[in-house]
Amino acid sequence: MRQIRRSDLTPAPWKNGGGLTWELAAFPEGAGFPDMLWRMSLAEVASDGPFSAFPGIDRTLTVLSGQGMVLDFGGGSVTLGEDSGPLSFPGEAPVTARLGAGPILDFNVMTRRGRAAHAVIAVSAGVPAPPDTRALIARQKAVTVAGFALAPGEALMSDPGRDLGGTAGDGPMLAICLRMTP
């Protein structure tokens, strides 16, 4: 297992230039966006605006900190805050974000449709992570899990070929389950 801290990562501009992202992990390791099968990242949303389009990608977004945002999908909107569950949507969907009051930090998982699949599951303190969990992310407060102290937004990743299923922490976390599709 390895701990991933945002402070150890280099931020990169969004595809549309409207913000910053910190890649926590991708597969294959070191793959750029055109070649990746899955990707986990943190994003800082500092202003209102459109999301980048990612055709053929399934996405899940969870707000980790800040006053939340409203995502407008054209035919309806969804309000997300720190206590909201993960929201899944297709990467090609036209989405515009409106911030509640100031910047937010969110966690994103993307998988290439037809090649990989994911689930992001909110896990309460003391509840074991489900099978096939590849990463655990601390939510609103620091969490101790498997002897690692995670600050909000920090991740604990499993080694390749292993999962963190059955692992529990002492605070709220996100369990990220990943699998390759045939």
Image (spheres, rainbow, N blue to C red):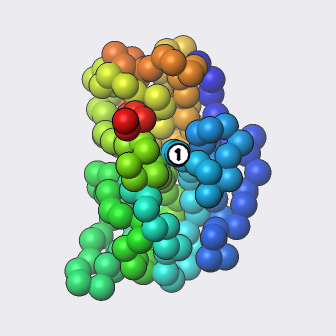
In the picture, the quarter occupied by the N terminus is top right
Bin the neighbour count of mark 1 within 10 Å (Cα to Cα): few under 14, some 14-19, many 20 and up.
many
Q: Position of residue 6 (x, y in %)?
A: 66, 44
Mark count: 1
- Which residue appears at 40% of the width and 27% of the height? 133
Identify whether 182 is placed above or below 81.
above
Residue 55 shown left or right of residue 118 in the figure: right
Q: Nearer the viewer, residue 78 or 53?
A: 53
Q: Residue furthest left?
A: 76
Residue 164 sits in quarter:
top left
Q: Nearer the viewer, residue 8 or 96?
A: 96
Residue 146 shown left or right of residue 170 in the figure: right
Residue 88 shown left or right of residue 157 in the figure: left
Q: Is residue 126 visible?
A: no
Query: Callout 1: helix, strand or loop?
Result: loop
- Which residue appears at 35% of the width and 64% of the height? 90
Q: Is residue 86 visible?
A: yes
Q: Amino acid at mark 1?
A: Leu
Residue 3 sits in quarter:
top right
Identify whether 94 is placed above or below 85.
below
- Which residue appears at 60% of the width and 42% of the height? 26
Residue 167 sits in quarter:
top left
Q: Position of residue 176 (x, y in %)?
A: 41, 36
In the picture, the quarter occupied by the C terminus is top left
- Which residue appears at 29% of the width and 32% of the height? 124
Q: Position of residue 94 (x, y in %)?
A: 39, 79
Identify whether 170 is placed above or below 137.
above
Q: Position of residue 13 (x, y in %)?
A: 70, 67
Q: Circle 1 sits on which residue?
A: 37
Identify whether 151 is placed above or below 128.
below
